[in-house]
Image (tube, helix red, strand yellow):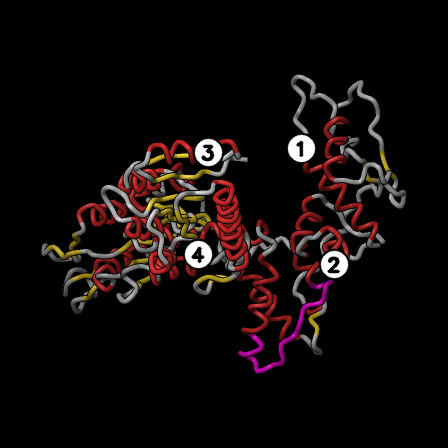
Amino acid sequence: MPKTRVLIIDDDQSMIELAEFHLQAQGYETGRAETGEQGLKLVEGSHFEVILTDLQLPDLSGMEVVKRLKELSPESEIIMISGHASVSKAVEATKAGAFYFVEKPIEFDELMVLIEKAVERSQQAEEIKQLRGKLTSRASYCNIIGGSKAMQDIYEIIDSVAESDANILIIGESGTGKELIANAIHYKSLRAKKPFVKINCSALPKELIESELFGHTKGAFTGAAMDKIGLISRADGGSLLLDEIGEMPVELQPKLLRVLQERVFYRLGSDKAQEASFRLISSTNRDPMEALNEGRLREDLYYRINTIEIRVPPLRERLEDIQHLAEHFLLEFAEKYQRPVCRISEESYQRLFEHSWPGNVRELQHAIERAMLLCKGEIIEVDALPFQQTAPRAMAATTVAVAGLQSRSLPATGAEPVTTIPLGQKVDPGEPSFETIGRIIVEKVPDPKSGADPVDVFSEIERAIVSAALSRTRGNKQAAANLLGLYRPRLYNMIKKHNLSNNN
């Protein structure tokens, strides 16, 4: 653990040295500054849990130092020291943000107790901050539903880049919600009050895309009976979404590149330059590398549109979001069809978690809508879902290896057999801790052979533990999740990952 750091700001050398002696003797790491400005510079470049500062400094008043320190490092606890103590000064220091006001001469035993309390308060504040961060982990964000780590990362990217004008490329399979992410970027940007114009490059004939993007003048081509404003003009000041950018005709891509580089464009049939002030967001459901290799996407355009890349994972890779999404769609369709809100049975949830979701979130949305319409009671059962049960999977052995490693996947070695504990047999009470079990596991892991494939020890242990939990709870997955302290979707994800199923 890193040492707690204490900064001492005082122009009295003897005071600094004496304080350092007592603090370092108690295991604290110290910093020193003889003026207020020196102290502020140290705090700018490093973190101190506790700061001791004199009220009388040669350059700045102690009160001003306290205020500026709290601006630079709000989490630091400040103890003010003064040889001219008064109630009014103590009150003023507290209002400025000081944790405590101490009068000289200092009793260092009492000061050490104060510093310990200040450190404890600082640690509690950090714990509360972390707890709040966990409690406010977003399960939804700008109409995007999902609380998985992958989605949280996407929300962080959106927060970081939305207010910039950086070009964004969103990559993800059909139905993953790319357009919702594009909406979030636009409506959290500084261009939110301006138009957000969208075009699907795969939905228009090739000969019309150029006209749609840039516009045309009357008589520019056969059938151009009047002037037309293009989508780039309509997006002026706002954002332009080019959906399925990989389907844009190759011959049109240099013109789009020129717009992005020069910020001007020309309508078909006109030589008058038009200004282009828009933020470009592109999306594709195919790997852009494939489009590059096949010559369907120009490399120079790819690097221009891909300043920031957001990859949206398919639903099968974030199964923990299924419950959030399913509950959201239940409420949505209950309101749409004026029906009472149903709930989803455990067996139905299991079926949802086992499905591969080739259509991603859009497929789940349709599945819940169908289930809502077919539901005859208050609970959605499996027969209301639109897909069949997946093939049964073989249940892993119900014996748990204490090391979790005596399996086919390990290379044969001369190591002694791993001790196993049959289910139902009690573990030796002298060896109950996870730390002890972890030590046994590591001691029993055979040394890897040169050239042999590496074995994922943690994966093997996870498989064994999940299998044991299912056996202990007689296949009750909710009970197994409770036993292991897991959110049910996470347990289902592990069951699917290790090809476990319940035959009990």
User: Residue 499, position in %: x, y?
Assistant: 72, 45
Callout 3: 10 Å neighbours few (<14), some, many (20+)? some
Q: CA distance from mark 1 to mark 4?
A: 34 Å
Q: Amino acid at mark 3?
A: Glu
CB atoms at circles 2 and 4 under 8 Å apart? no
Label 1 belongs to which residue?
456
Q: Which of the two discs, 2 and 1, labels the residue nearer the N terminus?
A: 1
Q: Which residues are magenta?
A: 333-348
Q: Residue at 24%, 57% (x, y): give it.
A: 278
Q: Nearer the viewer, mark 3 or mark 4?
A: 3
Q: CA distance from mark 1 to mark 3?
A: 40 Å
Q: Nearer the viewer, mark 1 or mark 4?
A: 1
Q: Residue furthest bottom?
A: 338
Label 2 belongs to which residue?
478
User: Residue 478, position in %: x, y?
Assistant: 74, 58
Q: Residue at 66%, 25% (x, y): give it.
A: 453
Callout 1: 10 Å neighbours few (<14), some, many (20+)? few
Number of marks? 4
User: Residue 303, position in %: x, y?
Assistant: 32, 41
Q: Which of the two discs, 1 and 4, labels the residue nearer the N terminus?
A: 4
- Between residue 409 and residue 116, name the one nearer to us: 116
Q: Amino acid at mark 2?
A: Gln
Is residue 150 visible to the viewer in this orientation of the structure?
Answer: no
Q: Residue at 28%, 51% (x, y): give it.
A: 64
The correct choice, above or below, for 97 with respect to 309 in the image is below
Label 4 belongs to which residue?
178
